[in-house]
Image (cartoon, rainbow, N blue to C red):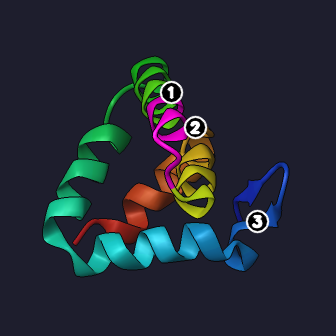
Amino acid sequence: MHPTNKKNGPLAENEDFINLIRVAREDSEIRQQLLQILRLDAFHRQSLLNSWIEDLRMKNAPKELIRSLLCLVDDDIAEKAAELIEF
């Protein structure tokens, strides 16, 4: 069974999430920052992501970035994302 974003269907079809993973795999600084977040326990990861997302919204960040980060609030998706970007 593949992780799904409850609002947008299978992650394999979510271009925003795929792009986030691609960038994280290509850029070691972004990869390390994301892994630090993804390695937190669920409560702290979700709290940090929600605060970051709200800050990005106030700064009119690209909607694609916000949508990709929203995926990481889900425990299963966060776990899969960490597996995909860890080397």
Mark 1: which secondary structure? helix
| Snapshot quadrant of residue 45 | top left
The residue sitting at 46% across, 33% down in the picture is 49
Q: Are marks 2 and 1 in contact (CB under 8 Å)?
A: yes
Instruction: Establish if 71 lies above or below 51.
Output: below
At label 2, which amino acid type do we have? Val
Q: Decide: is 58 above or below 68.
A: above
The quadrant of the image that shows the N terminus is bottom right
Q: Are marks 3 and 1 in contact (CB under 8 Å)?
A: no
Question: What residue is at 74 percent from the left and 78 percent from the top?
Answer: 13
The residue under label 3 is 1
Q: Mark 1 is on which residue type?
A: Gln
| Mark 3 or 2, nearer chain start | 3
N-term-proximal mark, 2 vs 1 = 1
Q: Classify residue 12 by image quadrant.
A: bottom right
Question: Residue most toward the left?
Answer: 29
Relative to 28, 21 lies left or right: right
Query: Where in the figure is residue 29, as x and y percent of width and height?
Result: 14, 62
Q: CA distance from mark 3 to mark 1?
A: 23 Å
Whole-angstrom CA distance, mark 3 to mark 2, is 19 Å
Instruction: Please provide percent x and percent y for residue 17.
Output: 57, 67
Kind of residue sitting beneath label 3:
Met
Image quarter where the C terminus lies is bottom left
- Residue 25 falls left or right of residue 2: left
The segment highlighted magenta reads 54-61
Instruction: Point out which mark residue 46 bears.
Output: 1
Local crowd size for mark 1, using a 10 Å CA cut-off: few (<14), some (14–19), many (≥20): many
| Residue 66 is one of the magenta-drawn residues | no
Q: Is residue 55 left or right of residue 57?
A: left
| Residue at mark 2 | 73
Q: Position of residue 27 (x, y in %)?
A: 21, 74
